Image (cartoon, coloured by chain):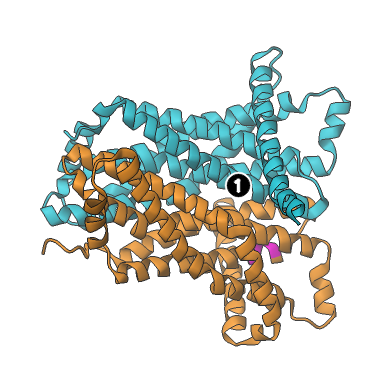
Chain colours: A cyan, B orange
């Protein structure tokens, strides 16, 4: 009885730890083979980058506009109206759009749209035994498939973050207009509070998100098994893990950034 | 010109298809046809509880922590750390936690349904159901929708509790800018049962849409094992866009430009 209970609790925990370890190994191998010559992944990198770009730009646009119009836009404007200080919304948008929501929504959309597509693609290749065929031909799947996706997703997530911030600010402008406010004070408080630390923190954070998403999605795709349901299940697990990992990392990173750079918190 | 119009036309026809599918499933549930399979409904509800609940709560908890630290640091900088509770209350209840719920539901439950139903479609199990005289739409989709309606309100309410606890931990224990009593006073003052009801409505609309979208993409999967993977990925795209749109419309409709706060005019 005790033994069976212990085994039921122990096995999933061990599997999870093994999986995390495997992902770490994959991360290490990816970085090493990205740096070590030869570099055969240029063409694949460009095509993956364009693929991510084509897939994500529209969902990301709608998502950032919607969330920034509603959450920091309308709700924060509601709060500021109480004090008659609606011009302060620009300052709040530094906190909301640049530091928190921009990167978070970028990560969610990239994981949900590009990450799932990558897992489905690699999973299909695994099921059709194309990955084994590549290995037989002497082509390293990590170097030729994982590295270009890893780099493409990292670069794309970092750049998309700027795009998300831009459209997030449009959402804020819409909220100001809905409240019948002039836009001048918004821009004034926005640029007074804007800080390079915030921007680089945001971009660095997002680039790491891209790396996390790419590794999890590639790993899950390359280890898919079990026929038709296997690929679907791999996509499911990949996106769940990616969300949890990204938000856990976000918590640690935000906490560190805020605690080590207190000057970005000063409201000007 | 034709090429330019091809994409919107494709989207429109897909939207129509999805709308008709959703209408059929909803009428199956409201027409009580689903009650013939109440055993299956309860089984789906049970599967939802065992396999998805903890992970949904985990994301809600983490986002509650984030609301807490952002609020604490932001209001400390404003010189009003005592009011961290306002930020936490609004961020948790009104905005971010419904999104967290929607994200994780789309990722865990939505794609899970697509993978499961898609595999059934590919291996001709759905056709087999039809041949046996079972209405596959009711048996597979309507039972899942009713099952999720039975379970998810409670999952969401408990998850909100978890997020509140997380915000409390972040603001009071971790950052420590305000005393426990001071935080709770402001925190409970700036929310009311109506807010809670609105938040629950938002989350349940998201849940309904996510389950239906998952059923649609799984039920209509095609193209072998690869097709299941592609359908799963596609469902996630639509779900994410819809979650954000529902969140925005919910805020606009429920709160709009009236703060519903205990201070001010």
Q: Residue most toward the front?
A: A2
Q: Residues within 10 Å of mark 1 (few under 14, many from 20)?
A: many
Quadrant of residue A153 within the rendered picture: top right
Q: Is A130 situated above or below B31? A: above
Residues in magenta?
B214-218
Residue B231 at x, y = what percent?
68, 55
Residue at coordinates 28% horizontally, 38% vertically from top-left? A94
The residue beneath circle 1 is A239
Left/right of residue A58 with respect to residue B230 in the rendered view: left
- Magenta segment's dominant SS is helix
Residue at mark 1: chain: A
Mark 1 falls on what kind of element? helix
Residue at coordinates 87% horizontally, 25% vertically from top-left? A137
Viewer-side residue, B32 vs B22: B32
Q: Is residue A111 visible?
A: yes
Quadrant of residue B41 within the rendered picture: bottom right
Left/right of residue A241 with respect to residue A66 in the rendered view: right
């Amino acid at each position: 009885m005790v033994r069976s209970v212990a085994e039921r609790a122990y096995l999933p925990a061990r599997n999870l730890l093994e999986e995390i370890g495997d992902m770490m190994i994959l991360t290490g191998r990816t970085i090493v083979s990205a740096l070590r010559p030869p570099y055969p992944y240029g063409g694949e990198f460009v095509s993956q980058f364009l693929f991510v770009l084509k897939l994500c730009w529209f969902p990301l646009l709608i998502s950032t506009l919607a969330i920034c119009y509603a959450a920091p836009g309308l709700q924060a404007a509601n709060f500021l109206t109480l004090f008659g200080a609606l011009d302060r919304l620009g300052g709040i948008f530094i906190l909301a759009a640049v530091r928190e929501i921009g990167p978070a929504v970028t990560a969610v959309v990239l994981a949900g749209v590009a990450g799932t597509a990558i897992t489905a693609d690699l999973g299909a290749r695994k099921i059709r035994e194309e990955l084994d065929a590549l290995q037989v031909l002497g082509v390293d799947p990590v170097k030729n498939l994982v590295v270009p996706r890893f780099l493409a997703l990292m670069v794309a997530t970092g750049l998309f973050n700027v795009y998300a911030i831009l459209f997030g600010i449009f959402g804020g402008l819409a909220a100001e207009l809905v409240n019948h406010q002039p836009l001048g004070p918004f821009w004034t408080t926005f640029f007074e509070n804007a800080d390079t630390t915030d921007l680089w923190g945001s971009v660095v954070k997002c680039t790491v998100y891209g790396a996390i998403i790419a590794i999890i999605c590639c790993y899950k795709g390359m280890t898919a098994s079990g026929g038709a349901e296997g690929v679907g299940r791999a996509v499911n697990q990949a996106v769940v893990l990616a969300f949890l990992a990204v938000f856990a990392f976000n918590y640690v990173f935000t906490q560190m950034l805020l605690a080590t750079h207190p000057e970005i918190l000063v409201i000007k | 010109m034709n090429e330019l119009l091809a994409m919107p036309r494709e989207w429109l026809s897909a939207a129509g298809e999805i709308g008709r599918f959703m209408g059929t499933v909803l009428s199956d549930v409201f027409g009580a046809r689903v009650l013939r399979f109440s055993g299956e409904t309860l089984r789906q509800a049970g599967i939802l509880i065992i396999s998805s609940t903890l992970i949904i709560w985990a994301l809600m908890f983490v986002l509650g922590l984030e609301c807490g630290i952002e609020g604490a640091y932001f209001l400390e900088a404003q010189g009003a750390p005592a009011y961290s509770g306002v930020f936490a209350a609004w961020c948790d209840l009104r905005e971010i936690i419904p999104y967290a719920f929607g994200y994780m539901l789309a990722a865990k439950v939505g794609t899970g349904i697509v993978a499961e139903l898609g595999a059934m479609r590919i291996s001709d199990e759905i056709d087999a159901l039809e041949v046996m005289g079972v209405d596959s739409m009711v048996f597979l989709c309507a039972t899942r929708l009713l099952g999720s309606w039975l379970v998810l309100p409670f999952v969401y309410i408990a998850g909100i509790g978890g997020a509140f606890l997380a915000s409390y931990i972040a603001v009071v224990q971790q950052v420590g800018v305000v005393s426990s009593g001071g935080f709770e006073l402001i925190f409970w003052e700036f929310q009311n049962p109506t807010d809670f009801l609105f938040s629950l409505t938002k989350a349940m609309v998201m849940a309904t849409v996510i389950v239906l979208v998952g059923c649609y993409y799984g039920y209509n999967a095609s193209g072998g094992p690869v097709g299941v993977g592609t359908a799963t990925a596609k469902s996630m795209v639509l779900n994410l866009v819809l979650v954000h749109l529902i969140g925005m419309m919910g805020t606009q409709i429920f709160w709009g430009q009236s703060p519903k706060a205990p201070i001010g005019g």
